[in-house]
Amino acid sequence: MLQLREALMDLTGVLNRPQPDAALIEMAGIDLDRALFPLLVRIERRGPLGIKELAELCGRDYTTVSRQVTKLESLGLAARQVHEQDARIKQAVITEKGRVMTTALDGAREKIITSLLADWDKQELADLSRLMRRLADDALRFVQAEKARQA
């Protein structure tokens, strides 16, 4: 378990550094503050999203995310719309310009991942994908259970 914990800490440390984000943005050929692109990608993948939900997904403060979504709006990458069932809730949605940017980010991310995993065989890749999905799903369930417990 110690080796797994250390590997996760190392991976998290790498992913939280500014260099991988800066490299991804440069490789994608886009001009975007690196603090904004994780929000943009989540809006594109899971949107429309309420600001509170987006903040939880990103592990950021609601007011920070609200300001960042406003910035994405000013850049024409995202927009806010009224929630279909609850008019009190504003949801962030991707724009066509935002989708073009996330497509460029996806292409760059694919190149980076392909390079990182170039020496892995198909079975190793399949195992990694399956186990990472399982870990992510279990982690999400844990967070949801903790949130319900604290409510």
Image (cartoon, grey):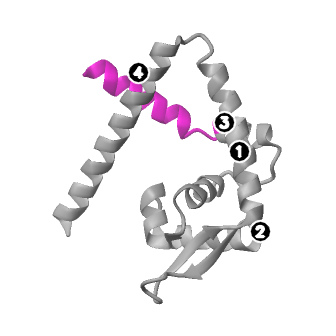
Q: Quadrant of residue 129?
A: top left
Q: Residues within 10 Å of mark 1 (few under 14, many from 20)?
A: many
Q: Which element is circle 2 on?
A: loop
Magenta stretch holds residue 60:
no
Residue 6 location (% of width, % of height): 36, 24
- Cα distance in 3D space between marks 1 and 3: 6 Å
Which tag, 2 or 4, sits closer to the chain's start? 2
Q: Which residues are magenta?
A: 1-20
Residue 26: mark = none
Mark before the other along the chain sequence, 2 or 1: 2
Q: Residues within 10 Å of mark 2 (few under 14, many from 20)?
A: few
* SS for dot 4: helix
Q: Is residue 136 left or right of residue 19?
A: left
Kind of residue indicated by mark 2: Leu
Residue tagged 2: 75
Residue, disc 3: 109
Residue tagged 4: 127
> Which residue is pictured at 33% across the width and 23% down the height?
4
